[in-house]
Image (spheres, grey):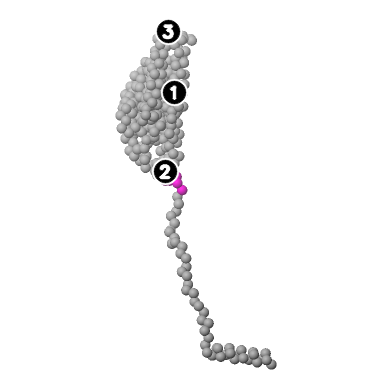
Amino acid sequence: MRGKKPYQILWLICTLALAGLATGVRLWQESTVFEGDFGLPVRGATASVAMVCVLVMAAAVLCILAARQPIVRPPRAQVRGRRWAMSFFATGDLVFLALMWFSAFSALAAVPMLFGQGRALWKAYQVALAMKTWQGGDNGVLSMVTAVLALLAFFGLLQIGRDGYHPGRRSRGGFWAALPACAGCGWLLNTYRNCAADPVLWDYVPLLLAVIAGMLMYTDWAGMSCAAARPRRTLWLAGMTVVCSWVALASSPDTGTAMLLISQSAAALAALWRLPINLQNPPKVGWEGNLDTCSIQDSEPQVEPQEPQPPLTQPEPQPRVEEDWTWSREESQAMNCTGENKEEDTHV
């Protein structure tokens, strides 16, 4: 654990320090840049330039940390199974569980506020239509859609925390992480719809950056359970989500938006708390340990068993049979007769 703890602490310290610095600069900007009855910003104000510099510096520092993050890549044999699915496993980690559940219940707290706001706008829209005085604007539909998606995000974040704390079975981590990503899409549309007519960019640009960073973080979180894992980019997006969310909170948004910002910043801190450790030392829990052995066995070539053959034996030596050269009496007399006849022929 000695090799893993410093990077986890480094991510948290740098992210919180940058978020605190950006929040302070944003408060300075809020108090000095905007003037007049309409709150128009002063061109080239020092606080605005400092705000841009702090955001660029935060992106650069977190990018350097992400590039230097050590990663132990799983064997290629696990690519068909869950190659990166264990990246957010936190067996017995109460801090990860508390952060994820706090994020989930913060998203749940935003549901009645967003739905009530959308319903009030919808009623005003219906009255304006009846009186034929409607001249365009927000009719509340996107706010109610965002509330429904925030409810789905609550279930997704709750299940992510549960599966990380008790990773004893295969979980659909990609599916549950995709739910808050979908909520981010609806939230982005609603935010842009409400702020599109605002001529002051500094009023809503930090909020848009926070929503986009959180949505992309959840998208990469879901990709960790699929074949599109980008662990370093996920860490960078988690850090930028915390920084941009704190800057947006300093602008005093409405209560529903503030709860969603708190929710995604807590989830980003949970990712920064657990992901660096698991990237350096991938856990093996429950079925994942069996998956490693099975995947390694599957990667080896299968050899069909052959029937054992009996050992080769040399043929036994045959006993040598000696030829019988003994002749019978009749054969010997016949041979003597032929020999005498030959001698007589030679004398003649």
Which structural element holds mark 3?
Answer: strand
Which structural element holds mark 2?
Answer: helix
Q: Residues within 10 Å of mark 1 (few under 14, many from 20)?
A: many
Which range of residues does the magenta coloring cover?
295-301
The residue under label 3 is 35
- In space, the residues marked 2 and 3 are separated at their CA atoms by 65 Å
Can you name the residue that lies furthest to the top here? 36
Q: Are marks 3 and 1 in contact (CB under 8 Å)?
A: no
Q: Is residue 201 left or right of residue 256?
A: right
Placement of 169 over or under 107, stated as above or below: below
The residue under label 1 is 62
Q: Position of residue 109 (x, y in %)?
A: 31, 24
Point 63% across, 91% down: residue: 341
**Quadrant occupied by the C terminus:** bottom right
- Nearest the camera: 213 or 38? 213
Placement of 219 over or under 120, stated as above or below: below
Mark 3 or mark 1: name the one nearer the start of the chain.
3
**Quadrant occupied by the N terminus:** top left
Q: Position of residue 258 (x, y in %)?
A: 36, 20
Identify the mark at residue 295; answer none if there is no mark.
2
Mark 1 or mark 2: name the one nearer the start of the chain.
1
